[in-house]
Image (cartoon, rainbow, N blue to C red):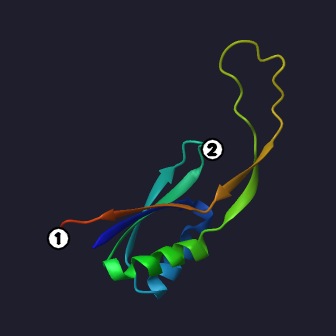
Amino acid sequence: MKLILAVIQDQDSNKLMNALVDNNFRATKLASTGGFLKSGNTTFMIGTEDIRVDRALQIIKDNCKSRDQLVAPISPMGGNADSYVPYPVEVEVGGATVFVLPIENFLQF
């Protein structure tokens, strides 16, 4: 048995949940916050048998696309900010960061 932890952008969470349910995967959604852009994310915890891991990963890949987004850079915290011009910067966001962990024991009460 494996535990899949998938951190995705909030925009993709409903689409991913529907696809997982359609393919008979059970998942728990957790609200999370990214450290880089300080934006909302969703973390999925998916427990599955070893032989179904590849299918789950394909569903995640198909439903969580990266996209470009304009973000305002964070102003400097110290020193002289006179020369700082906060022009928006285009960065790639979205997609999925996925961890697959072995599960030693699964209990349900």
Residues under labels 2 and 1: Cα distance? 36 Å
In the image, residue 59 above or below residue 8 = below
In the image, 88: left or right of 67?
right
Give me the disc on residue 73.
Answer: none
Quadrant holding the C terminus: bottom left
Q: Furthest-top residue in view? A: 79
Give me the disc on residue 37.
Answer: 2
In the image, residue 43 above or below residue 47 = above
Spot occupied by residue 101 in the image (x, y as percentages of width and height)? 33, 62
In the image, residue 95 above or below residue 58 = above
Residue found at x 17% / y 70%: 107
Q: Quadrant of residue 37?
A: top right
Q: Amino acid at mark 1?
A: Leu
According to the image, label 1 marks what residue? 107
Mark 2 vs mark 1: which is more N-terminal? Answer: 2
Label 1: few (<14), some (14–19) or many (≥20) C-alpha neighbours in 10 Å:
few
Spot occupied by residue 60 in the image (x, y as percentages of width and height)? 53, 72
